[in-house]
Amino acid sequence: MENCIFCKIINQEIPSYKIFEDEKVYAFLDISQATKGHTLVVPKQHVTDIFEYDEDLAADVFARIPKIARALEQAFPEMEGLNILNNNKELAYQSVFHSHVHLVPRYSKKDDFSIHFGNHTDQRTPEEMQAIADKIKEQVK
Ligand code: 5GP
Ligand code: ZN
């Protein structure tokens, strides 16, 4: 897609630090290394976000992630964990609108990276939980 920075990276129109490429995906270092080895895995097909994937594309992208994860682990034996993250839409911190999956190696609790879910286990009744589940379940097609 024109004017998409990740399409330009995939097409070699702008440089990147490539990790892996095949017919379906392109993986490269995030220019802003949240931690050492922070990698982006992107489908070569331009899709804006997760809502545009079909099952085949999702399978193609996720199928490649474990071997890239293992490569990070082998490359950096001091790595102690890995966060896999996919932001969708601006509110959820998406800033590049060609879908991508972040692989963020973790070395220490002091890494400049955090995810905070909080603990809200006592905030909804069982009835509310069931109603939420039912509402979503009806829409899974
Ligand atoms: P998002 O915020 O959409 O989940 O993640 C976009 C990521 O793309 C950011 O972490 C940002 O550092 C990275 N990024 C933005 N522009 C470029 C670029 O030109 N090259 C590379 N390698 N990464 C980029
Ligand atoms: Zn694109």
Image (spheres, helix red, strand yellow):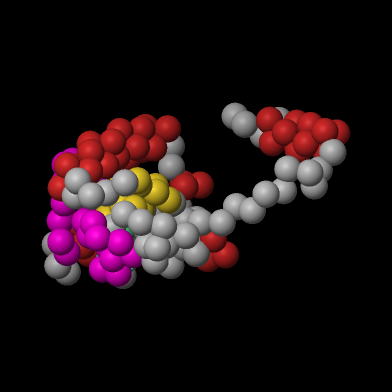
Would you identify the image quadrant in which residue 48 lies? bottom left
Indicate the position of residue 32 as horizontal and vertical percent values. 30, 69
The quarter of the image that holds ligand 2 is: bottom left
Indicate the position of residue 106 as horizontal and vertical percent values. 34, 53
The magenta span reads 16-37
Membership of 25 in magenta stretch: yes
Indicate the position of residue 62 as horizontal and vertical percent values. 34, 37
Q: Which residue lies at the image location 71% right of the left edge and 30% below the top edge? A: 138
Question: Is 112 positioned to the left or the right of 115 in the image?
Answer: left
The answer to whether residue 47 is seen in the rendering is no
Q: Is residue 72 above or below residue 140?
A: below
Question: Is 19 positioned to the left or the right of 127 in the image?
Answer: left
Q: Nearer the viewer, residue 61 or 119?
A: 119
User: Where, quadrant-wise, is the N terminus in this rendering?
Assistant: bottom left
Would you identify the image quadrant in which residue 111 lies? bottom left
Q: Which residue lies at the image location 35% right of the left edge and 46% below the top edge? A: 81
The answer to whether residue 126 is seen in the rendering is yes
Q: Which residue lies at the image location 36% right of the left edge and 33% below the top edge? A: 59
Q: Is residue 28 above or below residue 91?
A: above
Would you identify the image quadrant in which residue 16 lies? bottom left
User: Where, quadrant-wise, is the C terminus in this rendering?
Assistant: top right
Q: Which residue lies at the image location 42% right of the left edge and 32% below the top edge? A: 55
Membership of 65 in magenta stretch: no
Q: Is residue 3 above or below residue 79?
A: below
